[in-house]
Amino acid sequence: MTPTAPARKAYRTRSPGEARRSDVRRDDVRDVFRALGNETRRDILEILHRHGGPMTSQRIAEPFGMTWQAISRHLRVLTEAGLITCTEHGRDRAYNLKEDRLHEVVGAWITTLDGD
């Protein structure tokens, strides 16, 4: 007998000073935590946060001693999780941190631990 997957669940999030419903799903939480589960990807998020604005993939890759393919994969996982955005400018790509997405998804997951 094959176990059935749990029903898709929407998590409740709270913004500062107000309670509201969110469309954060289990898939969103899974994708974000999968992205955060890798140290290099967490480092990329920190670099983007410290920079405070868009950065090219080349500038993001500078501190890492890895192949372009490896960095590209990390950027793709972060983009697919909705934690960064990618804007193309000709042949260059600029990446920007989406802090609101990180707060929304992680915050929604944390509220489930409060038992609300």
Image (tube, helix red, strand yellow):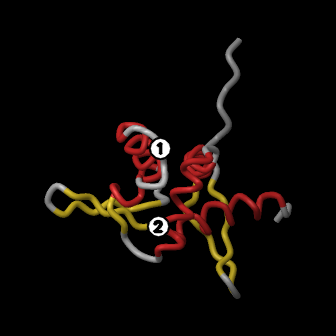
Residue positioned 53% across, 66% down in the render: 101
Q: Nearer the viewer, residue 92 or 30?
A: 92
Residue positioned 59% across, 54% down in the render: 42
Sequence-earlier tag: 1 or 2: 1
Q: Residues within 10 Å of mark 1 (few under 14, many from 20)?
A: few
Residue 106's disc is none
Q: Residues within 10 Å of mark 2 (few under 14, many from 20)?
A: many
Look at the image and tell me in which quarter the N terminus lies.
Answer: top right
Q: Image check: 3 left or right of 70?
A: right
| SS class, disc 2 | strand
Q: Position of residue 55 (x, y in %)?
A: 36, 66
Marks 1 and 2, how far apart at CA: 22 Å
* Image position of 27 with respect to 21: above or below: above
Residue positioned 41% across, 40% down in the render: 73
Find the residue positioned furthest to the left.
90
Q: Position of residue 89 (x, y in %)?
A: 18, 63
- Residue 11 visible at all: yes
Residue at label 1?
A: 65
* Image position of 20 with respect to 81: above or below: below
Could you tell me the amino acid type at mark 1?
Gly
Find the residue positioned furthest to the top.
1
Could you tell me the amino acid type at mark 2?
Leu
| SS class, disc 1 | loop
The number of numbered discs placed on residues in the rendered structure image is: 2
Residue at label 2?
A: 97
Disc 1, disc 2: CB below 8 Å?
no
